[in-house]
Amino acid sequence: MYYRSSNGGDLLSTVKLTAAQALVRFLTQQYVERDGSERRFFAGCFGIFGHGNVAGVGQALQQYAEGLPYYQARNEQAMVHTASAYARQKNRLEAFACTTSIGPGATNMVTGAALATINRLPVLLLPGDVFASRGPDPVLQQLETPNDGTLSVNDCFRPVSRYWDRIARPEQVIPAALAAMRVLTNQAETGAVTLALPQDVQTEAFDYPEEFFEKRIWHVGRPLPDTGAMDRAVAMIRASRRPMIVAGGGVIYSEATEALRRLCERTGIPVGETQAGKGSMPYDHPCSLGAIGATGTFAANRAAREADLVIGLGTRWSDFTTASKTAFQNPEARFVNINIADFDANKHSGEALVGDARATLDALDDALGGHEVEQGYREQNASGSQEWDGEVGRLYALEHGPLPAQSEVIGAVNSFSEPQDVVVCAAGSMPGDLHKLWRTRNPKGYHVEYGYSCMGYEISGGLGVKMAAPEREVYVMCGDGSYLMMNSEIVTSIQERYKLTIVLVDNSGFSSIGALSRSVGSDGFGTHYRYRKEGSIGLDSEEAPGDVLPVDLPKGAESLGAHVIRTENIEDLKKALADAKVVDRTVVIYIPVDRYEGVPDYDSFWDVPVSEVSEMESVISARKEYAENKKEERRYL
C-alpha cells in the first residue's frame, strides 16, 4: 500500500505492523531539543504484563528492545512514580512510558497519573483495555455498565490525564501518538498522557506510512512575554519598596537559577522558595530567605507579610505556598506572575508574564537597568537569612533524648551529603521539616514531591532520580507509614543495580497527621500503630510502650535484598551513613525518633477546618484559634 505525500507529490511507502508495534517503533524515534541540545525523549518503558498487554505491547517491546528498553517493576503505581521522578530530574526533557494489563494493573496507575499531572511531569501511560470488537464480552476484569457499552475502568484516567484517548482501530495510532507527543513536550500542558489500548487492537495489523517512523524532533522553546505586560511589570517593580520573589518549580525546569541569582544580586530582591522551587538559590546566599508559606522559615514569612510586590516565578500558588492566603498581609501587595502557563500566570489578579522563566528573567534584568532596592531592605533580608541559618544549626544539634528528634536526623544526612547528592521525600512530617531545614547547595539536590504529597512515592521516586542521575548519591528520607505503603521497588533498585540510601525513620505511626490531629483537638486519634485495646487503637494521652506493634521494619527490608544497618542515635546514624557509602547495593538505615519532638511553625498558618461544634473541650478551644487565624485570609484581588 502507498500513501500520497502531504504536498500531493510522490507516493509514500508503508510497512505492515501491529498497532502495538507501530506505537513502540514511533516512540523510539521521538527527540526533543532545547538551546541547541538534542536528546531522545523516551528513556524506556516500565511494565507489568498480563493478558491485556503481553501479546501486544509486550511483544512489541521485545521486538524493539534496542530502541525502547523494557524495565520490570513490582507495583504499577510505583513504576509511574519512578517515571515521574525521572522526568523531574531531567527537567521534563526526557520521560518514560508505562504499560499494564487491563483491570487492577491499569487502575493501580491512576494515583501515579494524578501525581504526574498535578506536578506537571510528562509520563506516557499505556494500559490494556477490553476488546474493541466486544466479541468475548464480558472478559476477565471487565467493568460492565447497563447504560454505556464503551465504558471501561480506563475511563478513570480521564480527569487525571492531560490527554486521554482509546485506540479503537489500529490506524488511530497515528493521530493519537502525535497528539500524545504534543502534550508531553508542552511545557505548560504536560502531565500524564493515557492511551488506552484494547487487547485485540494491540495485535491487529495495518499498513503504516514509513514517514510516521522517521526521526521527529520536538522543539522546546523559550518564549518571552508580551512587551506591554513586561513594561507594566517593570513599572510595578520600580515603584515597589519591599518586593519579594517566590521561586517555584519553573525556575528549576527552565534552568533559570543563574539568571535568578544575577537578578537578585544586582537588585537586592529577596527570594522565598516553594517545595518544587527549593534549590533555586543556594541556602547561604544573602538574598535567600529559604522556604516560604505553611512550612516556611521565619525569614521568608516575615518578608512575605510586609511585601508590597510579590513576583511569582514558576509557581502555581498552592495553599502551602500562600499559607492558605495569609502569607501576604500588606494591604498594598500586588502580584507579578512569570509562568509558562497562562493559567498560573493569571492567579491572584497578577500582572501575567507568560513565558519561559530564564528568558523572562534575563529580559527583566535588562529592562530594570540599574534599579535596586533600598540598602536597608537589602541588609534586613541578609540579616534574616543569617538568623534563620542559626536556627537550622540549633535544630540540627538538639541532642534530644532518649530518642533523637527528626531535625537531628535531617542534620546528620545533610551534613554528610555532598552538594550534588539528592534528597528524596514526599509525605508525612518529613517534607515540611526538609523544606525548612535542608541546606540546598545544588539546584537538583532537593526532590520532594509535594504537589500530591503521595505516601509511597519515596523509594520509587528515589529510583527514578537515580536512573536519571546515576552519578549522584540519592538519599531517600522515608517515614515508617510511607515505607509500609510501598517498599516494593527496593527489589527493582537491586535488580537494575541502582543503589539508593534509604533513611527509614520510625515513629510507630502517622506522625504528621498525629501532630495535625493534636492541633485540631483530637489527641492523635487514629494515627498510632497500636494493638486494639477496649475498642480503641490509642490516643496520645493513652500511650503505653507495651501497646506498640512488634513490626520489624529492618528485617523486612533485608528480606527484599537491601543491606540493612540498625541505629539507635545520631552518632550511630553518622557512622552508618559513612558505612553505607561503600556498599554496592541499596542500603536501608533504620533509626527510631521521637514523634512528639517536631520543628516549630514559623509565622504561618494552614487552613484545616476544625469542627464548629463539639462535646470535646479540646476541639472547642482549637475552633476558637482556627477562627482567629481565618480572619487573616485574603482573596488577593
Image: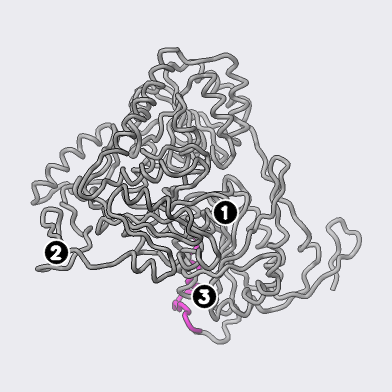
Residues under labels 1 and 3: Cα distance?
Answer: 33 Å
In the drawing, does residue 403 fall left or right of residue 46? left
Image mark count: 3
**Residue at numbered disc 3:** 102
Vertically, is 431 above or below 142?
Answer: above
Judged from the image, the secondary structure of the residue bearing numbered disc 3 is loop
Residue at left offset 34%, top offset 33%: 297
Q: Residue 470: which disc?
A: 1
The quadrant of the rendering that contains the C terminus is: top left
Judged from the image, the secondary structure of the residue bearing numbered disc 1 is loop
| Spot occupied by residue 569 in the image (x, y as percentages of width and height) | 28, 50
In the drawing, does residue 523 fall left or right of residue 637? left
Near mark 2 (Cα within 10 A), the count class, few <14, some 14-19 or many ≥20, is few
Tell me if residue 49 can be seen.
Answer: yes
The quadrant of the rendering that contains the N terminus is: bottom right
In the drawing, does residue 199 fall left or right of residue 535? right
Residue range corresponding to the magenta coloring: 139-159
Tell me if residue 335 can be seen.
Answer: no
User: What's under tag 1, amino acid-wise?
Assistant: Pro
Judged from the image, the secondary structure of the residue bearing numbered disc 2 is helix
Label 1 vs 3, first from the N-terminus: 3
| Spot occupied by residue 216 in the image (x, y as percentages of width and height) | 75, 55
Q: Residue 546: which disc?
A: 2
User: What's under tag 3, amino acid-wise?
Assistant: Ile
Vertically, is 254 above or below 615?
Answer: above
Label 2 vs 1, first from the N-terminus: 1
Residue 335 magenta:
no
Q: Are marks 3 and 2 in contact (CB under 8 Å)?
A: no
Vertically, is 95 above or below 446?
Answer: below
